[in-house]
Amino acid sequence: MKYKSNLIALLLAGTFFSAAAQQPEVIVVNAAKSEGKVSPEMWGVFFEDINMGADGGIYAEMVKNRSFEFLKPLMGWSVKGKKIGEGDLLVQNRKGANLANPRYLRATIKGAAKGEAGISNEGFKGGMGVKKGLKYDFSLLYRQITPGITLHVELLDEENKVLASGSMKPIDASGEWKSQELSFTADATAAKAKMNIWFEGNGVLDMDMISLFPADTWKGRKKGMRRDMIQMLADMKPGFIRFPGGCIVEGIDLANRYQWKKTIGPIEERQLIMNRWNVEFNHRPSPDYFQTFGLGFFEYFQLAEDIGAEALPILNCGMACQFNTAEVVALDQLDPYIQDALDLIEFANGDADSEWGKVRVSMGHAEPFHMKYLGVGNENWGPQYIERAKAFQQAIKAKYPKMNLIFSSGTGPDNDEFRYLDKELRGMKADIIDEHYYRSPEWFLKNAARYDNYDRQGAKIFAGEYAAHIKGDATGSNRNIWEAALAEAAFMTGLERNAAVVNMASYAPLFANTEGWQWAPDLIWVDNMNIYGTPNYHVQKLFSTNKGTQVSPALADGKSLSGQDGLYVSAVVDSIKKEVIVKLVNTNTTERTKQVTFEGIKKLAAQGNLTTVKAALTEQNSMEKPSNITPVVSSLKLRGKNAVVKMPASSFVMLKVSYK
Ligand code: AHR
């Protein structure tokens, strides 16, 4: 019986493949042979506050400019009502008393009824997304100079219909700064709502940190993160989360760099700075883009822990963005920057009695975060970088020899700058080299074998930022077409095949707001109410949720497939789940069929799962059609150790088979 079915399989295989006689017909996956371990951190995510990724993004704060610290102190706010006259609303500055958050708003109200004197906040890009039945938590810091004002807070839709409201009489009359909260539930939905605060009565009231959060944050944490966005990340099961960038690490100049110590502790003491993407692109001006740091390093570590990812912070190495000012700190003044790195490790991993470990504990995390990776600089280059990188390496390794340090290889994968850095970094025995490539789909296809000949003994590679950028006039989410995602999938088979040297990879950037982006393409698009994963997201997710534990050779005519006849293939075994997983990319505009033969497995299941993602190259997902391109799972019967896999035109196909 067995003999008969094998015979039929052979005959069938013969008919399938006679048409393409010159092409490899059989792909042999030898599951008993390991070509290297797949690092548990292989597929991760790159997070940066770009495209409204943090403020106006995962950080669920709905009030724009809550502390009046934007360049224009009343940006995002407007004054309302006939009983507000000249000088009744003043932005005051307590510099000296509160260096990080000096401004506040003083309201002097003289006998106003509700609706006669107030302020209104427009929310982030496009207004506030308000959902029917959802509770909202309003809060503020206040100081009553002359008690007597009651606040009426209301959320309104575009037609000024009230969606939710509540009133608050400040309780404390000591003249000290206090906080108070008020919650209300919306009885209707609006995508572009705003918030009014009416002042009723007589009195003088100082206000700061005027805030509104939805109650349905990620894990229900108060003043936490937008749940739908974090869920999309959690669903990817990323091996790491790189933060906080990206170029915001470097800053336009050193003063504008990211400084982690200013992002922890009470949020009202975190000093806001302008987001460098505010002014980066003339064609995408974002004058209201600032970093409040309500989402800071503690929250990033906590997020990493929540989603089971390794935290991978990147720190400034004493160099501002070399595309901007290219300001560097003098070498003899580099110590504070290096100290920041040492202190960060102590903050993340130190005991409760260490100086910085104590700070972590005081923020509510007694256990260490067990940080293993640290990036030194983002896209920095030149001898100036190497000098600084060496100083960081020496100091950090002296104190924390096991910390895996990641160094930049510049902005591109194949220029002089890259070759210089690659040589220098290998010379200084860098643990991990961070390579970035924003290139055309063609580049990704041509470079799928990039790592086949990389030195296995030297530095490991972190493909820290990459995305296929299509040519032409497309802007925004239109750039996330299937052609780009398919090219990335093809390239990722090369990363996977070379997991022995490529230990980490992340697409970039991660999030973008449809009304507030600066850079595209991006992995996940959101607006105030909705979210969708691009085709690129599905590709990333399929790799990261099927990463396996070791690489198996997948050979056709004794060679791995990285572009022959438009096909790209990689295979992994998951020795924990007992699965063998083959990923195949067909970049042809016609179907291909291959026989996958599994060697080195005694008891293979009789049936596998076939996941197929296919589309025309120009197709994409959108808010209107979020699932236009989505993986479809079917089952596939094996014939003994053989599976006949049909790869539709322009498709990414994944075959997963269990074994005992
Ligand atoms: O991902 C967008 C930007 O691209 C990053 O901030 C930077 O590192 C790179 O140039």
Image (cartoon, rainbow, N blue to C red):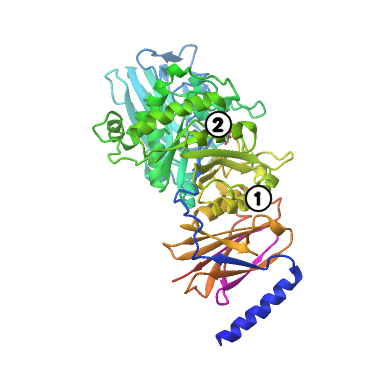
Q: In this orientation, which residue lies closer to the viewer: 40 or 138? A: 40
Residue at the farthest right position: 19
Type of amino acid under label 2: Glu
Residue 171 showing in the rendered view: yes
Secondary structure under the numbered disc 2 in the rendered image: loop
Badge 1 local density, few (<14 within 10 Å), some, or many (20+)?
many
Q: Of helix, strand and loop, which mostly describes the magenta segment?
A: strand
What's the residue at 68%, 38% (across, down)? 475
Mark 2 vs ligand 1: CB below 8 Å? yes
Q: Is 325 rendered above or below residue 652?
A: above
Give x and y (percent) for residue 159. 57, 36
| Left or right placement of residue 103 versus residue 19 in this view | left
x then y, percent, for residue 382? 57, 26
Establish if 558 lies above or below 425: below
Instruction: Tell me, yes or no, if residue 264 can be seen here.
Output: no
- The residue at 50%/63% (across/down) is 33
Residue 581 highlighted magenta (yes or no): no
What label does residue 379 carry, if any? 2
Count every numbered label the image shows and give the total: 2
Q: Residue furthest bottom?
A: 1
Residue beneath disc 1: 487
**Closer to the N terminus: mark 2 or mark 1?**
2
Which mark, residue 431? none
Q: Which residues are magenta?
A: 635-655
The quarter of the rendered structure image containing the N terminus is: bottom right
Q: Quadrant of ligand 1?
A: top right
Number of the front mark, 2 or 1 = 2
Query: 99 and 62: which one is in front?
Result: 99
